[in-house]
């Protein structure tokens, strides 16, 4: 029973790790930016120069006047820049406040989400394929032990066959001795 329990825990841990890597790391949003939105988009290459503008592309704009009364900041930010702040930036992929759908998800958000889900599926399938390959290549039992178990099973079957044959022969002799032989008996 422990084998099944450990197998279930292993599967659960692989899926959990795939979600942790996909959701918490910045790896996938960086790849999406480099290959789809960055300066090298469509060229099939990614490097340091392809990440120019990534931080700006990963931050959304929020208009400070859109704060609810109870969550409005205490300061207007004039102590930092000398003028009151109108916008703040936060990490997300949302439309700006002056768009048709203010603060709605951008197309980049959906691309990043699709890439994350694809990563989860590919990662867990890859790990399970490697696991099954390794378990296929490395047997659970050594070859000599497996051969001995087969030999023992064969000997047990042979002993059971001989014991059953002796029992049937004894029954047949007793029937002949008692004169209760039937014509429909097997020979």
Image: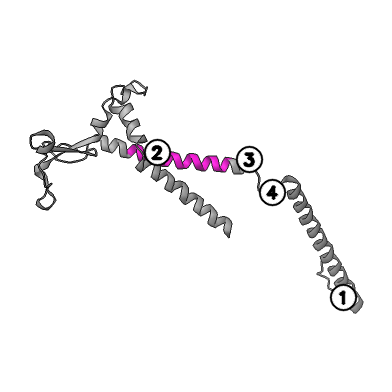
Per the image, the residue denoted by label 1 is: 175
Q: Which circle's residue, 4 or 2, is located before the other in the chain?
A: 2
Lower position in the chain sequence, tag 3 or tag 2: 2
Q: Residues within 10 Å of mark 3 (few under 14, many from 20)?
A: few
Residue at numbered disc 4: 141
From mark 1 to mark 4, how far is it between C-alphas?
A: 49 Å
- Label ID, residue 119: 2
Contact (Cβ within 8 Å) of mark 1 with mark 4: no
The residue pinned by badge 3 equals 137
Look at 26% across and 27% down and name the residue there: 53
In the rendered view of the protein, which quadrant contains the N terminus? bottom right
**In the rendered view, would you say 176 is above or below 137?**
below
Q: Is residue 15 above or below residue 39?
A: below
Which one is earlier in the sequence, the residue at label 1 or at label 2?
2
Q: Residues within 10 Å of mark 1 (few under 14, many from 20)?
A: few
Image spot of residue 91 (x, y percent): 24, 39
CB under 8 Å between discs 3 and 1: no
Give me the residue at 49% from left, 39% from top: 126
Whether residue 127 sits left or right of residue 89 in the image: it is right
Mark 1 or mark 4, earlier in chain: 4
Q: CA distance from mark 3 to mark 1?
A: 57 Å
Q: CA distance from mark 1 to mark 2?
A: 75 Å
In the displayed image of the protein, which residue is found farthest to the right?
177
């Amino acid at each position: 029973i422990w084998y099944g329990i450990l197998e279930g825990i292993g599967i659960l841990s692989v899926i959990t790790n795939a979600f942790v890597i996909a959701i918490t790391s910045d790896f996938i949003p960086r790849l999406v930016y480099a290959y789809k939105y960055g300066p090298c988009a469509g060229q099939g290459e990614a490097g340091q120069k392809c990440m120019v503008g990534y931080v700006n592309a990963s931050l959304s704009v929020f208009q400070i006047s859109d704060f609810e009364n109870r969550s409005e900041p205490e300061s207007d930010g004039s102590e930092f820049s000398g003028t009151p702040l109108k916008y703040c930036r936060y990490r997300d992929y949302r439309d700006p406040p002056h768009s048709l759908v203010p603060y709605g998800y951008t197309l980049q958000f959906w691309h990043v989400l699709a890439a994350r889900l694809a990563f989860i599926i590919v990662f867990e399938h890859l790990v399970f394929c490697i696991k099954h390959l390794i378990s296929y290549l490395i047997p659970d039992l050594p070859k000599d032990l497996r051969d001995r178990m087969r030999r023992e099973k064969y000997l047990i079957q042979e002993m059971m066959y001989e014991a059953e044959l002796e029992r049937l022969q004894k029954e047949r002799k007793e029937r002949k001795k008692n004169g209760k032989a039937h014509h429909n008996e097997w020979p």
